[in-house]
Image: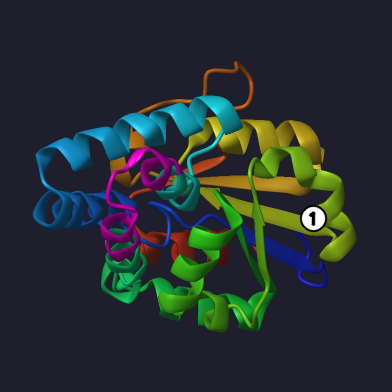
Amino acid sequence: MAKADRVAFLIDVDNTLLDNDRVKQHLESILRGQGGDAVERRFWELYEQVREDLGAVSVPVTLERLRLESDNPRATDRLGLRLYATPFSQFVYPGALEFLRWLRGVGVPVILSDGDPWFQAKKITDAGLGVAVGGNVLIFLHKENHVEDIRRWYPADRYVAVDDKADVLGLLRQGFGDVLTTLWIQQGHYARTRSSSEGTQPDFSVATVPDLRKVIDRIL
Ligand SMILES: [Mg+2]
């Protein structure tokens, strides 16, 4: 990569910048503590149903379905408020905010997240990640289907994608072609799931956020 190239960094959120496995544990403890075992069990059943229906998970849609079938909808509303009040900044990985600020000095960092637009946006804002990238935030249900949009909104000579899912990196590589370098950060429960498509294995693998900087320094 030549020094003069404009580089855009496409950085995932869940289990890349923020420990989403721990966020999920936090949600579980609220559901159990405030709703009880039956409500918690039903919430996760509906959560999986939503994943099947929409092709992506959504806390707000899950809560809406839980509320519809509840005989005490106001209790569901109170539960929702507790879930939305999750202190997301406590789950940011060490060094993540510094890493994003450093990226602003070498290129354009863009948060490229998937998930439902409301809960995910709240997570990114409350965690301080949106501010750290100067407001460059894109959220799609499936980011790999939006390569043209990403290139139009953030034109660059080279792109670098960072994600905890090797499969997503493989799909992004198929969409972007050789202008994209892929960095697999092996954190969270996808840390050992290799890309299922041959020939699209990530270019680099790292264990933690501070390691990303070392690799990017080398390839710039
Ligand atoms: Mg992720």
Give coordinates of residue 117: x percent, y percent. Answer: 60, 57
Res 10 → quadrant: bottom right
Q: Main secondary structure of the magenta part?
A: helix
In the depicted view, which residue is nearer to us: 47 or 217? 47
The residue at the point 14 percent across, 54 percent down is 29
Q: Is residue 102 visible?
A: no
Mark 1 Cα shell of 10 Å, populated few (<14), some (14-19), many (≥20):
some
Q: Quadrant of the N terminus?
A: bottom right
Q: Quadrant of the C terminus?
A: bottom right
- List the residue tagged with mark 1: 150
The residue at the point 26 percent across, 58 percent down is 75
In the drawing, does residue 58 fall left or right of residue 34?
right
In the drawing, does residue 33 fall left or right of residue 59?
left
Asked if residue 51 is positioned above or below residue 184 in the image, the reply reads above
Res 41 → quadrant: top left
Residue type for callout 1: Ile
Residue lying farthest to the front in this orientation: 71
Q: Is residue 51 visible?
A: yes
Give coordinates of residue 59: x percent, y percent. Answer: 43, 50
Per the rendered image, the range of residues in magenta is 65-78
The residue at the point 50 percent across, 76 percent down is 125
In the drawing, does residue 31 fall left or right of residue 218?
left
In the depicted view, which residue is nearer to us: 104 or 80? 80
